[in-house]
Amino acid sequence: METRYIAYYRVSTQKQGVSGLGLEAQRTDVNRFISKGGELITEYQDIESGKKNDRPNLIKAIDECKKQNAILLIAKLDRLSRNASFIFMLRDSKVDFVCCDMPNANTVTIGIMAVLAQDERERISHRTKSALAELKKKGKKLGTPENLTDKARETSLQIRQQNAIEDENNRKAGALIIALRKQDKSFYQITKEINELGFKTRTGKLFQQNQVQILYNRYKED
């Protein structure tokens, strides 16, 4: 009997939901996954902010998985939420789920990633507020037209996103490395495991053992 799946998609804005922007990419990932074996029963979609926990159609998808004895299929892990409590709610629902971009991940891995993603979001917010407060203290005018050109906003957004992605990737991998090290696994074993789980370096490559040791030494004091 083929494995049965129920797909869940999330787009962050009403505009994306109407245009299909982002949604079609998720469907492509799901269809590619299903083509390797399995049956897609039905699909659910929410249009929500990633920071919100109110996902009515995800709740329906979870309920349908229980009724159909199916697995919840998600295209990308970041489509779920950047909120740790939401990930834990999904875990506690006892419904099996798989993410196309990280099919070997388990609930422990995803729990670690969720906590770190939320932590990073809060750190970015805190750093931004602190930087703005410091500029105000120095008498710097904020929000002036020359600082708000489309090009300046785009450049600033790209820099912030890139920094967040790099920092978050390292922190996620680092947390898992520390957890596995506490299980007395060697750096060789850890390197093999995180590569199999789909973790990548900030340049998008597989981890080497020396890089794993560097991350362990960097984050073990946190």
Image (cartoon, rainbow, N blue to C red):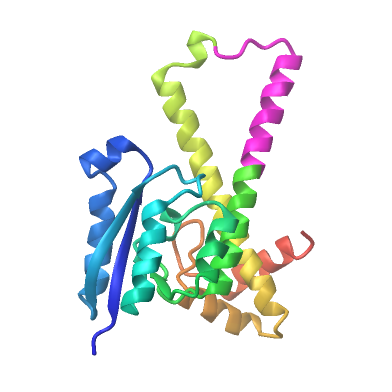
146 lies above or below 172: above
**Magenta-drawn stretch, dominant element (helix, strand or loop):** helix
> Is residue 142 magenta-colored?
yes
Give the left or right position of residue 131, taking residue 75 as reference: right
Give the left or right position of residue 152, taking residue 181 as reference: left
x and y percentages locating residue 55 in the rendered image: 43, 51
Residue at the bottom extreme of this rendering:
1
Q: Is residue 100 visible?
A: no
Q: Is residue 152 visible?
A: yes
| Quarter that holds the N terminus | bottom left
> Is residue 1 magenta-colored?
no
x and y percentages locating residue 91 in the rendered image: 53, 69
Instruction: Give the residues in magenta.
Output: 123-143
| Quarter that holds the C terminus | bottom right
x and y percentages locating residue 197 in the rendered image: 47, 74
Give the left or right position of residue 160, taking residue 59 as reference: right
218 lies above or below 133: below
Q: Residue at x 64, y 65 (%)?
A: 174
Among the 4 quarters of the image, the one containing residue 171? bottom right
- Along the viewing direction, whichever of 186 and 130 lies nearer the viewer: 130
Q: Residue at x 47, y 57 (%)?
A: 203
